[in-house]
Amino acid sequence: MKIKLSILLLILSGMLFGNENYNNYWPNWRGPNCDGVSTTATPPVFWNDSTNIKWKIPIPGNGFGTPVVWDNQIFITTSIELKNTEPEGIVRFVVYSIDRETGEILWEKVVREQLPHEEIMYFASHAAASCVTDGKHMIASFGSYGIYCFDMTGNMIWEKDLGDMPDPLALGEGASPVIYKDCIVINWDNVGQSKIFVLDKDTGEEIWQKDRKEDYTWATPLIIEYQNKSQVIIPGKKKSISYDLFNGNIIWEIAGLDESIIASPVADGKSVYLMAGVPSAGILQCINLNKANGILDSVDNVRWSSDRGIPYVPSAILKDEKLYYLKGSRSQLSCVDAKTGKIYYDAIRIKGMKGGYPSPVCANGNIYVLDRKGTCSIIKEGTDFTILSQNKLDDNFYASPVVVGNDLILRGEIFLYYISK
């Protein structure tokens, strides 16, 4: 038990060591341990438009970033296309802090207004990245339109412009920033010169940057502590690489996943799980961290791999030595043994649900799977597939669910919903 607890405490991606509050909140887009799991939340399993909705508020514009939560504050971003402007198409980039108890806006900051340098598809957003916070700093990233650091009362501490990412396919930008110790890590993969940036959390000054030989990727970096090194792990189409957080040296690298890199990695202290797919295919690799040094091969360094039911957009849940993930962007859930890859159940279709981009989350022994049309199925955690309930809201959803305290937060296309018993 003590060994398992020690391992859990090492996987604090995006958080400060020693902060006893991090596990009670949802400080980045995949939760306190970046695995889609809350070990403290007890959210509702039943709701609809008139039941267990504590409050809902309209959010203007277009934003796909998952809400993040610290104490009584919810942070989100949005992009609002302004009307009657010259030239047409100018976008306002906005950051919100919202009161958890009442849904009132505590502060609202317009950080930039400009004509985007690239158009985006209807299923993308200029505000696709999630914020990240450590309870003192709150980082909002609009990618090509700036990185912004606020204190918790809305005072801007610093801002950083890293330039424009070329996006000829109009797919948009999506990787979220990560806080770890005194660093901000930003994945800047695009069809131009891809990079990784590490910035000083307090000042925004660059600590180091490194060119990456990558195309489009959208995965948020994972940071782990292993063998006395802070490793920044970024999956890639050409190469998946682990960097030393403090100097940018490559700790290990392995041949890339050769698919669209959107799903973020997860880790358990012994292995890191990399996955990438397209709607009908993909690959999942379980990397043996004990042998992860230098250039890795798929024989000695990969514990197991799979090409069955791999996610396209949604990221996986890692809980109690089990991986849960959706096939492609469909509502088909798999559960496998994280140590061996043994399949417990394989891409079971969840009746009554459409596909979608939200990543599933886990709390209080239940898995929450949300589709793009507002249906959320609650599935019992474990090796048997059992649906406990199905709930519906009249909205469209791209952001992932958030579980915190006794509550569930869902960001729809129109409203932000606070669901409470």
Image: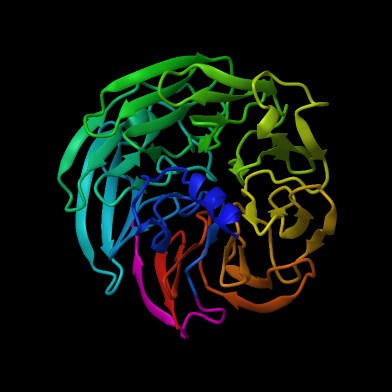
Range drawn in magenta: 43-60
Left or right: where 185 falls relative to 282 = left
Residue placed most toward the observer, 226 or 363? 226
Point 64% across, 53% down: residue: 318
Point 26% across, 44% down: residue: 137
Residue placed most toward the observer, 411 or 134? 134
400 in magenta: no
Across and down, in percent, residue 159 comes to: 23, 31
Residue 165 location, quadrant: top left
Residue 126 location, quadrant: top left
Left or right: where 179 falls relative to 51 = left
Residue placed most toward the observer, 169 or 144? 144
Across and down, in percent, residue 232 comes to: 50, 30
Point 50% across, 45% down: residue: 10
In the rendered view, tell whether residue 103 sits above or below residue 94: below
Across and down, in percent, residue 7 comes to: 56, 48
- Outermost residue, front side: 2
Point 37% across, 18% down: residue: 208
In the rendered view, tell whether residue 182 sits above or below residue 52: above
Kindly tell me whether residue 83 is visible in this rendering: no
Residue 373 location, quadrant: bottom right
User: What is the chief secondary structure element of the magenta stretch?
Assistant: loop
Across and down, in percent, residue 421 comes to: 45, 83
Residue placed most toward the observer, 246 or 69? 246
44 in magenta: yes
| Quarter of the figure that contains the N terminus | bottom right
Kindly tell me whether residue 159 is visible in this rendering: yes
Colouring of the image: rainbow
Left or right: where 105 falls relative to 364 = left
